Image: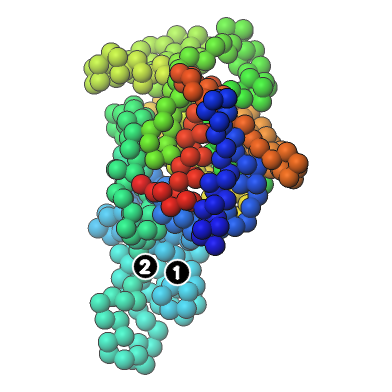
Amino acid sequence: MVRETARKAEASIRIDEAQGRFQVARAAYLDPALFKEEIETIFSRCWLFVGHDSEIPQAGDFITRNIAGRPVIFLRDKAGKVRCFLNVCPHRGAQVTRQRRGNASNFVCMYHGWTFQNTGRVVGIAEAANYQSGFNAAGCNDLVAVPRFDEYRGLWFLNYDGGAIGLVDYLAGAREHIDIVMDQAEGGMRVIGEALDYSARANWKLLAENSMDILHVNTLHPTYLDLIRTNSAGTMVRGKVVGASVDLGNGHSVVEREASYGRPIARWIPIWGEEARIEIERIHAGLVERFGAERAHRMAHNTRNLLIFPSLVINDIMSVTLRTFQPVATDFMEISAWAIAPAEEAGKPAMKRRLTNFLEFLGPGGFATPDDIEAFESCQRAYGAAREAPWNDLSKGFGQEPSATDELPQRVFWLAWRDWLSGRTP
């Protein structure tokens, strides 16, 4: 079966360099065997985003999540150490906690009352005298930690493969762009509110593609563009997109381009008024002082869509959003989105502008996200004709100098997908 899925993966991508053509088989969004292998290979061996450090600020804070089909507890233990356990009781396999989030020094399994400290150590076994003396030797009944768990710039990732390469090496060239986002905050980035969860009836790879697709904005999001044009009395219109898409290694990519809209971090627009201009000039001056004029300009005036393969997107555009997606079936995924902002913006007008931008465009009920969902759900429905019309085309910019609206990020993603399913892994 492994050899068969590897063959299917290889056959799913068709490249004709002479003609400048890059195609992906629509069957790759539909095939149950390929989907199963994606779970067993990609989502069981790649680094997957769990949460942000600021979501669990106090000792005892915890959040339960489902990461690639496994329930986990993301927590800060009594000593302040961040940990991640499988949310499975070692006894009979019930969830150790059914709460979405909270603060607890101990977890008590509702089935038989086994009790665990937030360090994972079992401290209570029902009728322990009925077990042999060595039953719990070496903590064999403690909560099971995920095999690999590590952090970069406040972003926590897990890996279900204990032999995987380290997180820093895995992130490769993406680290530079994560740094650009996180360095915008003098007091550190923090999640605002909670994760917003929603779903889509489409294959998870369609959201990975869409997240790096800059070309579709004019066609798919005219309502939002009309809103911005109207609210700015015609002073804000979308012009030519200036920038480039970049292969960052290991399936990661970024589209970095000049902003054509206001950025709360330090790009003022007239619609925000003179008071905001003064505040934003002060923020920009701080960036220049800390990083120099060139990097400060890049941080404030450039935007970036960053994909960490396979399923984390960082949108640093009119606000900063983290988005991750979990494959559930060939035609269904669960999605989570977080708004993050510099801690020092709390209670200031910059925060209000940032959250307005997030909710208007990037939030589940915004002007963009429902459009995007309808687009890739439409693709999923249309793939019912995959036998007669078998290929998607991702050729834009192939063999040319990359631009911001090329399909290079999609090609980077698919080549990494093929390599993982064919056994060529980092």
The picture quadrant where one finds residue 251 is: top left
Where does the image place residue 62, in percent across and percent down from the top left? 40, 56
Report the number of discs. Answer: 2
Q: Is residue 275 visible?
A: no
Residue that label 2 marks = 144
Which residue: 56% across, 40% down?
Answer: 13
Q: Which amino acid type is shown beneath numbered disc 1?
A: Val
Residue 308: percent from left, percent from top: 43, 39
- Which of 54/411 is in front? 411
Report helix, strand or loop for mark 1.
loop
Q: Nearer the viewer, residue 357 or 198?
A: 198
Residue shown at 45%/69% (left/top)? 88
Q: Which residue is mark 1?
A: 88
The x and y percentages for residue 390 are 69, 40
In this rendering, position of residue 279 left or right of residue 95: left
- Crowding near pointer 2: few (<14 within 10 Å), some, many (20+)? some
Check contact, mark 1 vs mark 2: CB within 8 A.
yes
Q: Name the residue: 38% across, 36% down.
A: 249
Q: How is the image coloured?
A: rainbow
Q: Which quadrant of the rendered structure holds the N terminus?
A: bottom right
Q: Work out whether 69 lies above or below 356.
A: below
Which element carries disc 2, helix, strand or loop? loop
